[in-house]
Amino acid sequence: MGPTATGKTDVAIALREHYPVELISVDSALVYRDMNIGSAKPDSELLARVPHRLIDIRDPSEPYSAADFAHEARRAMDEISAEGRIPLLVGGTMLYFKALIDGLADIPPSDPQVREAIEREAAIKGWPFLHAQLSEVDPESAALLHPNHSQRIQRALEVFRISGKKLSDLKREQAEEGSVLSPIGDEYQLIQMALLPENRLALHQRIEQRFNAILANGFEAEVRRLYQRGDLHPDLPSMRAVGYRQMWQYLAGQVDYDEMVERGVIATRQLAKRQLTWLRKWPDLQEIYIDYEAGRDEIFENSLANCLKILRNAPIYKGKSR
């Protein structure tokens, strides 16, 4: 994961040379057909050679939610795993990652004060002690967890202390309603890596260069075709995507071309800022920093080398990488 314009897709594709992975896109714009240039979608030749799940699965007229993604991504992960390969999720739509990782259930949101109190107690007495506490109040949840599985123990205790209800009971209620999706950490060994800029200003410059390259590649014509369909409007999730919203405003005569470009660059920078805000608070994250002063090839090689170092020390695959 990581903010826009950090080279996530290139690194993910390269990892196929080292591990038996299959890619799953985590991007709220790439799900839509006919939105190729502005979303920086891999071209058809690359997609034929390196298939990505969850790309081109919706028409731009159709809404697509984080819950839709979580269910479809879990199904893709299960299929990939059943075929003996490793699901590799790559993208920057952090809400999608959160829905998949945390699961979908009608449970209380996190309370920072309660969570901090649990962490302080764990620092003094250890997670096995808190696991024993959980066994007393929610034995069903505790039985599914290793005594040192800190993140899940913490969450189950947090839910009980906030609501007085067992996490296992809440999940069972949701399952009966057909809407529950358990956290993927209950079934998968999860390794989370993020490509992050060492210098925010350098990322901003890269974003501006990338947006100009998108414009030069025919972005206006792409959005014009969507604009002329007649069944799309600017309030659809697809047309609210960064870049598409600003180009739509230009085609509608609301702004001139230069203002569209300026707004598009600013919106993309704001997107990157939101992504970085998510990642600053993300638990269990392996951070890989990018030095944009290096050349493009060097950036890619360094990012790939750091990813491989993390993966080779992680219990995701029993055996040697290819």
Image (spheres, rainbow, N blue to C red):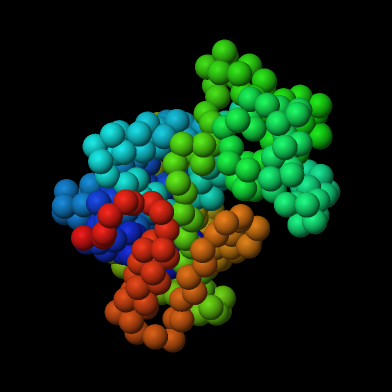
Q: Quadrant of the C terminus?
A: bottom left
Residue sitting at 52 percent across and 28 percent down?
181
- The image quarter in which residue 228 lies: top left
Residue sitting at 67 percent across and 20 percent down?
169
Answer yes or no: is residue 253 visible. Answer: no
Direction from residue 8 to residue 279 in the image, left or right? right
- The image quarter in which residue 315 lies: bottom left
Q: Choose between 51 and 210: the one closer to the eye.
A: 51
Q: How many marks?
A: 0
Q: Choose between 269 and 86: the one closer to the eye.
A: 86
Q: Choose between 41 and 279: the one closer to the eye.
A: 279
Q: Position of residue 210 (x, y in %)?
A: 39, 69
Identify the residue at the far top of this view: 176
Residue 84 position (above or below residue 40): above
Q: Position of residue 107 (x, y in %)?
A: 69, 30
Q: Position of residue 194 (x, y in %)?
A: 49, 62
Residue sitting at 81 percent across and 26 percent down?
164
Residue sitting at 78 percent across and 47 percent down?
118
Residue 167 position (above or below residue 51): above
Direction from residue 24 to residue 83 in the image, left or right? left
Direction from residue 171 to residue 302 in the image, left or right? left
